[in-house]
Image (spheres, rainbow, N blue to C red):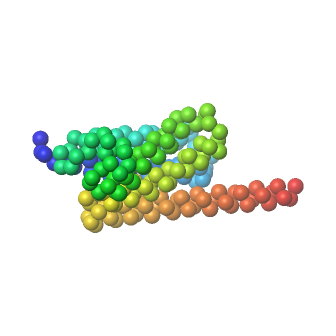
Amino acid sequence: MNPQTWWYMSRASGMVAWMVLGATCLWGVLLTTRMLKPADRPAWLLDLHRWLGALAVVTTGLHLGALVADNYTHFGWRELFVPQASAWKRGAVTWGVIGLYLMAVVQLTSLVMKRLPRRLWHAVHMLSYVLFAMVTVHGVLAGTDATNVIFVAVAGGGTAIVAFVFIARVLQGRAKRIVRAQANAAR
């Protein structure tokens, strides 16, 4: 086996995890903003959002496993799960560790969403955008591809798209609240 196999696997799985997380955020916005008309929203659309979220967890798990298996720099379980424990790019790795915990919170609350108050679940679920920003910072600071033109273009474009849909989501929510307030005031 090539001694760099695990290093390549950790890089690739990290990038794929980031892309899947971005796709999950985008798909969630498509569902909540009703950009897909209600008649065109079969149950599989929500299932796809859930599947993308689970795939983000799986690819993140592959990223962590490959880091442990790689011999280039030491990543044990302590370095993966304790913020500031890594000697290698401490700040960059900490962004990833905290992002991992945030991903776990979002996923776990999604699994039990029917048992949680809707407002609590929604507030936690909105942290997905914070999660995406955190892992973007992690990837740019920790990744060895940060100077690669293709990586920079994909990361910049993906981040811009997620930021745009997040802003659209926030503005749509504000517009709905204004319309509801005006309707309530007219009564």
- Place residue 88 in its image quadrant: bottom left
Please tell me which residue is depicted at 27% across the width and 41% down the height of the picture: 76
Closer to the camera, 83 or 11? 83
Say left or right for 176 vs 69: right
> Quarter holding the N terminus?
top left
- Place residue 66 in its image quadrant: top left
Q: Position of residue 158 (x, y in %)?
A: 41, 60
Q: Is residue 19 above or below residue 109?
A: below
* Number of numbered discs visible in the structure rendering: 0
Q: Position of residue 119 (x, y in %)?
A: 65, 45
- Place residue 63 in its image quadrant: top left
Q: Position of residue 78 (x, y in %)?
A: 32, 42
Q: Is residue 158 visible?
A: yes
Please tell me which residue is depicted at 29% across the width and 63% down the height of the picture: 146
Closer to the camera, 7 or 186? 7
Q: Is residue 14 visible?
A: no
Work out which residue is located at the far right of the displayed protein and give it: 187
Say left or right for 148 vs 29: left
Please tell me which residue is depicted at 49% across the width and 54% down the height of the picture: 130
Q: Is residue 1 above or below residue 159?
A: above
> Quarter holding the C terminus?
bottom right
Q: Position of residue 47 (x, y in %)?
A: 50, 38
Please tell me which residue is depicted at 75% across the width and 59% down the height of the picture: 179
